[in-house]
Amino acid sequence: EEQLLESGGGLVQPGGSLRLSCAASEFIFSFYGMTWVRQTPGKGLEWVSSISGSGVSTYYADSVKGRFTISRDNFNNILHLQMNSLKAEDTAVYYCAKDREAQPSYHMDVWGQGTTVTVSS
Amino acid sequence: DIQMTQSPSSVSAYVRDRVTITCRASQGIRNYLAWYQQKPGKAPKLLIYFASSLQSGVPSRFSGSGSGTDFTLTISSLQPEDFAIYYCQQTHTFPPTFGAGTKVEIK
């Protein structure tokens, strides 16, 4: 069964940094685009960032552009999200998700369990 | 960004009822529309993509239709495990955006 397992969430002060990771198993990781989606009670589901299967193409929401960096290690089957200059409004549950295609179509057919990021002083 | 408006925001129904949820896009998105189901404490699950294509493993009681700006998700005979929140998502125009969700509750 295809699986994704996130890690790296936690409590961080405003302006701080955090690196999320997502370990993939039971599918050929490099064949598929990958995405981070976050969820808050107030704003619902929000697409954050995506990366192509090769890692060459990356995409960001305006709300995180210049602060977050998505990357992938296709040898070790791991997706990362480096989050810098964190703000209170970045507080959310972050999900990694597998795309149905190599170039992101944003149709996500496998999701991790989520990791919680809390930005607070 | 394209706004996705779902209605109703919640619906109460009995087991074996037929339930229809609608989603309207603020501009035309052809058939670039997906539906997800989310249960409490769990991640969303893809049900439908390209408006009417059933994701592998999803029961056939789920169906999607529509094109352009107006879309529907239908559950033909509601089962106990279907009580959840359902989200639509457009994937036509960058950035992809989600609706606010429709909660399907037990009557």
Image (tube, rainbow, N blue to C red):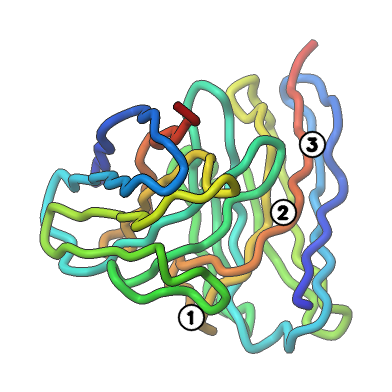
The structure residue drawn at horizontal position 46% and vertical position 48%, both measured from the top left corner, is: A61
Which element type, helix, strand or loop, lies under badge 2? strand
Could you say where residue B93 lies in the image, as x and y percent from the top left?
A: 27, 60
Give the labeled residue for mark 3: A17
- Residues indicated by labels 1 and 2 sit on the same polypeptide chain: yes
Could you say where residue A41 lies in the image, as x and y percent from the top left?
A: 56, 24
| Left or right of B86 in this view: B11 | left
Which element type, helix, strand or loop, lies under badge 3? loop
- State how far apart marks 1 and 2 are (Cα): 18 Å
Query: The residue marked by circle 1 belongs to what chain?
Result: A
Query: The residue marked by circle 3 belongs to what chain?
Result: A
Query: The residue marked by circle 2 belongs to what chain?
Result: A
- Three-letter residue code for mark 2: Leu
Mark 2 crowd level (few <14, some 14–19, many ≥20, 10 Å Cα): many
The structure residue drawn at horizontal position 32% and vertical position 45%, both measured from the top left corner, is: B19
User: Of A29 and A86, which appears nearest the observer?
Assistant: A29
Does A44 sit above or below residue B25? above
Q: Quadrant of residue A35?
A: bottom right
| Left or right of B59 in this view: A67 | right
- State how far apart marks 3 and 1 are (Cα): 28 Å
Checking the image for residue A103, the label placed there is 1
Mark 3 crowd level (few <14, some 14–19, many ≥20, 10 Å Cα): some
Mark nearer the N terminus (3 vs 1) = 3
**Comparing marks 1 and 2, which lies closer to the viewer?**
1
**Comparing marks 3 and 1, which lies closer to the viewer?**
1
- Three-letter residue code for mark 1: Gln
Give the labeled residue for mark 2: A81
Which element type, helix, strand or loop, lies under badge 1? loop
Mark nearer the N terminus (1 vs 2) = 2
Name the quadrant of the N terminus of chain A.
Answer: bottom right
Checking the image for residue B50, the label placed there is none
Could you say where residue B98 lies in the image, as x and y percent from the top left?
A: 39, 45
